[in-house]
Image (spheres, rainbow, N blue to C red):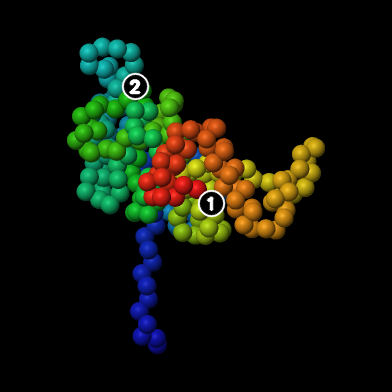
Amino acid sequence: MSDTPTKPTPAPWRATALTLFPDAFPGVLGTSIIGGAQKSGIWQLDTVDIRDFSTNRHRSVDSPPSGGGPGMVLKPDVAAAAIDSVSDARDGDRPLIYMTPRGKPLTQQRVRALSSGAGLIVFCGRFEGLDQRVIEARNMEEISIGDFVLAGGEVAAQVMIEACVRLLPGVLGAADSTVDESFEDGLLEYPLYTKPREFEGRSIPEVLLSGDHKKIAAWRDAQSKETTQARRPDLYEKVMAAKLQTGDGS
């Protein structure tokens, strides 16, 4: 028998979604490479039905906002009980995240940090939102996927989870697939082309067919900068400012 110790199998990256609609999961997370990675044990998905923690026979989870106004607000006692049912929600290695339009924008940098950890716990909001006292008491991180409003947090949660899962080792076929893409260097990705060479009167740029990797790299860099400056001047200015600080004016 070999005396070489066997390495323990790493625990899968784990996502737990607290939601009023557990049937919304896995949704798109059960398809393509993300669903395949789940089936192969790279990551794990659990759902918690918030309504299970209602304390009345009608299973209500919301109440009118204090001070008046339209809509309803998720009740703090129900939300807190649902959160506390997850064993590591308060003191574990996984951050507790609340999907809300008033949160900080989700960035690729934050996605990379989340994917490198043990996983995450995400609370999917509904109605007008969640009682502020729960957010503060449970130290919830508020995250937004964009400057718009959805009917609930389920789709937003799935967006965030998918962004994290695709970065896990073994999910994508090529290890470098995530290196040269939008936001990895702060810029938007350059235009992409493939066969056929001609399509509806449009040709693949000659530089991409030249075989000169230095010229191709320079063309792609220029295209990334041009696209970012035109579509996301905020990102472009941020990247250029960072380059000036580091002495890289390229």
Q: x, y percentage for residue 230?
A: 55, 32
Query: How many residues crowd mark 1 within 10 Å: few (<14), some (14–19), many (20+)?
Result: few
Write the residue at 46% across / 47% down.
249
Location of residue 154 (image quadrant): top left
Q: Is residue 160 visible?
A: no
Residue at the spot of label 2:
128
Write the residue at 29% across / 38% down.
141
The first of marks 1 and 2 along the sequence is: 2
Residue 197 falls left or right of residue 224: right
Residue 27 falls left or right of residue 214: left
Write the residue at 52% across / 44% down.
182
Above or below, comparing residue 73 to residue 116 in the picture: above
Mark carried by residue 169:
none
Mark carried by residue 180:
1
Amino acid marked by disc 2: Glu
Query: Which residue is nearer to you in this view: 142 or 90?
Result: 142
